[in-house]
Image (tube, rainbow, N blue to C red):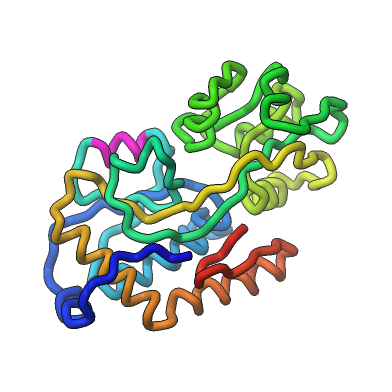
Amino acid sequence: MLLFVQLPNSVLAADLAKTTAAHQIITVVEPPSSYLDSHGRLTGYATDIVRALQKISGDRSHIQLMPESRALLTASRQPNVLLYGFSRTLERENNYHWIMPLARKKWVLYMHRDDPQQLQHLNDARALESIGVVRGDVREEWLLAQGFTNLQSSSSHAQNLARLGSRRLNAIAFEPQGMQYLLREAGQAPAQYRAALHFFETEVWLLMSRQSPASEVARWQQAAQQLQQSGELAAISKSWQQRLAQEQIHSNIEGQLLSF
């Protein structure tokens, strides 16, 4: 279900075109939400939503790609920083302004198909020698909060996949659609790996740095409300659902948003 701040319709369209402070808009490489295509151009389902919001609000900020830890550090230190594709968790709740949800994702532990170890519950994963996570990624944060001491951090999911393929890791924490994209880019067969345990689900959001002016937070929330009410959000989701289906990637539309 979409969770938008309901604002009077009278303040929507006219106010969105006003000149505003400079912004930074930052995301991470995590297909199919945000990634570089074969020509090196930023694309993705969440990227299309954010660009639609930029068009509504009159914002022309360049979208930057950063490692997740650096993106979060930037947002913690500066106003008017927008991050997208980041999970909303209890630990992060009071650190940001939450503009709108973008998608819902499953978190999965993947293992090599030849690894005989079986995981029935999350506690079983504590016995693994090593679980690959991305430094600063929400899955690293979450597993650390659960008391896991067998995590090995790297700079990217692609690096984790390579380490899993060479058996330097017992498992990696990722999500289904991103895994399919990584395997295709790496030229690896999906049958080499198995989803050993689906251990959590989360919503990913567009959020804004806590020290941003209330007027800017409200402006982006207005744009989000307008995107939903106009039907454009549903159209973006339908378009990406069809695009992903052509690549044998299944998704559902729930409350106008894709669920992977």
Type of secondary structure dominating the magenta stretch: helix
Residue 48: image quadrant is bottom left
Residue 171 magenta-highlighted: no
Residue at 42% of width from left, 59% of height from top?
101
In the image, residue 122 sits, relative to residue 93, either above or below, namely above
Query: Can you see residue 185?
Result: no
Q: Which residue is at 51% across, 59% downward? A: 103
Horizontal side of residue 102 vs 78, given as left or right: right
Question: Which residue sits at x=15%, y=56%?
Answer: 214
User: Which quadrant would the C terminus be assigned to in this image?
Assistant: bottom right
Residue 200 visible, this angle: yes
Please tell me in which quadrant of the rendered image residue 162 appears. top right
Query: Looking at the picture, how far across and down is residue 92, in whole percent?
Result: 36, 39
Image position of 205 (left or right of 243):
left
The number of numbered badges drawn on the structure is 0
On screen, residue 82 versus residue 166, left or right, reads left
Q: Is residue 230 above or below residue 155?
A: below
The residue sitting at 62% across, 48% down in the picture is 106
Q: Position of residue 8 (x, y in %)?
A: 21, 77
In the rendered structure, which segment of residues is drawn in magenta?
Answer: 70-76
Relative to 99, is 241 above or below?
below
Expressed as whole percent of the image width and height from the top left, the position of residue 232 reads 43, 79
**In the image, residue 229 lies at what x, y percent?**
37, 80
Looking at the image, which is closer to me, 229 or 31? 229
| 73 magenta-colored | yes
Q: Nearer the viewer, residue 144 or 158?
A: 144
